[in-house]
Image (spheres, rainbow, N blue to C red):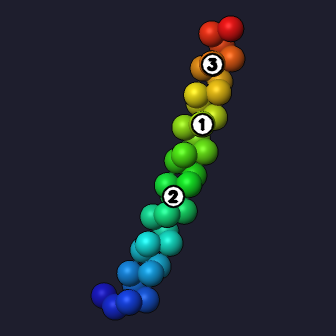
Amino acid sequence: MGIMGLNAAYIYISNNIIIIIIVMDNILLMSIHEKH
């Protein structure tokens, strides 16, 4: 596994983390709206 492989893995992981954060934010917003 070379530098290109590590860069691809890093980009893939960072993109997934951004998606997970967006999903978590949406779940939190929905739960807050349901409480009110």
In the drawing, does residue 30 fall left or right of residue 8?
A: right
Badge 3 crowding class, 10 Å Cα cut-off, few under 14, some 14 to 19, many 20 or more, is few
For the residue marked with disc 1, what is the amino acid?
Asp
Residue pointed to by mark 3: 32
In percent of width and height, residue 13 lies at 45, 64
Alpha carbons under labels 2 and 3: distance apart = 24 Å
Q: Which label belongs to residue 16?
A: 2
Q: Which label belongs to residue 25?
A: 1
Pointer 2 and pointer 3: residues touching (CB < 8 Å)? no
**Residue at the left extreme, as displayed:** 1
Alpha carbons under labels 3 and 1: distance apart = 11 Å
Badge 2 crowding class, 10 Å Cα cut-off, few under 14, some 14 to 19, many 20 or more, is few
Alpha carbons under labels 2 and 1: distance apart = 14 Å
In percent of width and height, residue 29 lies at 65, 27
Badge 1 crowding class, 10 Å Cα cut-off, few under 14, some 14 to 19, many 20 or more, is few
* SS at mark 2 in the image: helix
Give the number of marks. 3
Pointer 2 and pointer 1: residues touching (CB < 8 Å)? no
Q: Of tags 2 and 1, which is closer to the observer? A: 1
In the drawing, does residue 1 fall left or right of residue 11?
A: left
Quarter assignment of residue 15: bottom right
Q: Quadrant of the C terminus?
A: top right
Residue at the (34%, 91%) spot, across then down: 2
Quarter assignment of residue 31: top right
**Residue at the top extreme, as displayed:** 36
Is 23 placed above or below 9 here?
above
Q: Of tags 2 and 3, which is closer to the observer? A: 3
* SS at mark 1 in the image: helix
Residue at the (47%, 79%) spot, across then down: 8
Q: Earlier in the sequence, mark 2 or mark 3?
A: 2
* SS at mark 3 in the image: helix
